[in-house]
Each structure stands twice: as structure tokens, then as C-alpha cells.
Amino acid sequence: MYASNELKKGVVIELDGAPCIVENTQAASGGARGGTTTYHVRVRNLKTGQRLEKSWRAGEMVPSADVERRPVQFLYDEPGMSHFMDGESFEQFAFRHEDIEWERKFLKEGLEELRALFYNGQAIALELPATVALEITETMPAVKGNSATSRSKPATLETGYVVQVPENVEQGLRVNVDTRTGEYLGRAKG
């Protein structure tokens, strides 16, 4: 069980008999003295993909879903499907591309800290690391002397995802990307 004030992004709760992951939380306090705080939460049903808006008052308890997080390895893509291997049982499973549309923007072979959420023994969602290092495969050439400007340009990453990077970043460079927002964070080490 979670108290309503513990509902943060990534927490998995149970609503109407289905596991739902919290995507966003906003707290709103009552205007008058003694007004109670209400937590407005956007969740995504992990079975159907449907997004729901729910509200709970401060102190209300919300049931947690019985999910298990296990390390997994991305194996390969085929038309319409992405294949993975459970890091504990070594069993293989697949997700339809439309079920992991956001996650596919950051998936590459050998990705560390990739996890799957299992509900009743079945993989229902992927959990990415907070940041990933990806190589820029295409961008406009860097402009000499523009390292101090705040202008940006689009860069295509090795996964096909396009991110805005500073003007002085070049093709072939590895950059860190935030998997929650999809934003450029800086140059990757190594």
C-alpha cells in the first residue's frame, strides 16, 4: 500500500484489478484554512495502455500492484516486435512495437540496467535506466567558435531518435539522453 503522497513517477499501483504505472503527480492544497491536499495523478494501465486521471486526498491509501522487476537484455528487433531475454530465467519474450513505442527510442544492444515489470509471471512493461549514452549518427557540422552560444540543432541518434543538441556537437560523438524526457544531457564519457 502507498499513501497518496508517495505516488511518484514510476510507482506501480493496482486500479480496478490491473497494474498501472504513475506517469505524473500534482499536489493541490485546499484554499481555506484546514483545507486538505489533493493529489492528481495520471496513470497508464500496463495491460491496455489506457491513460487515466485519478485523484486522492492526503492520507488515503492506494493498493500497490504485485509486480516484479527483473533485469532483461534486449536481443533483436523484427517487424512489429522487439525480443528480450529474462536475465534470471533466461526465457525469451517479446513486446509489440506499439506497446513500447517510447522505450524503443532508447533501446540498443548491450543496454545496462534495463528491467522488465512482470505481473502474474508475464512481462507487461519495460523500465529504462534514467539515462542512456547513444552515438550521434547524423547532424549538421559543428560551427567553429559557437561553443558559447545557446542555439541548438537536431541530431539523429543510433536508434533513429532525433534530439536537440548544442550547435558545437559533432557527428560520431556519444551523448547522454534522459529517457524520461528525451532531452540531451551532455557528452557521454568514454
Image: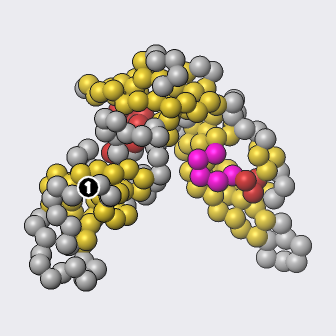
Identify the residue at image location x=18%, y=81%. Answer: 146
Report which residue position mark 1 lands on.
174
Pick the front one: 22 or 117: 117
Q: Quadrant of residue 70?
A: top right
Secondary structure at numbered mark 1: strand
Instruction: Establish if 62 lies above or below 171.
Output: above
The stretch in magenta equals 7-11
Relative to the observer, which residue lies in front, 37 or 69?
A: 69
Q: Quadrant of the N terminus?
A: top right
Q: Is residue 73 left or right of residue 123?
A: left
Q: Is residue 5 above or below residue 12?
A: below
Residue at the image point whose x is 88% and y is 78% from the top: 33
Q: Amino acid at mark 1?
A: Arg
Estimate the x, y position of residue 11 in percent, counting from the top left. Answer: 64, 45
Q: Residue at x 41, y 30 (%)?
A: 73
**Which residue is at a point 46% across and 30% down the rendered structure image?**
72
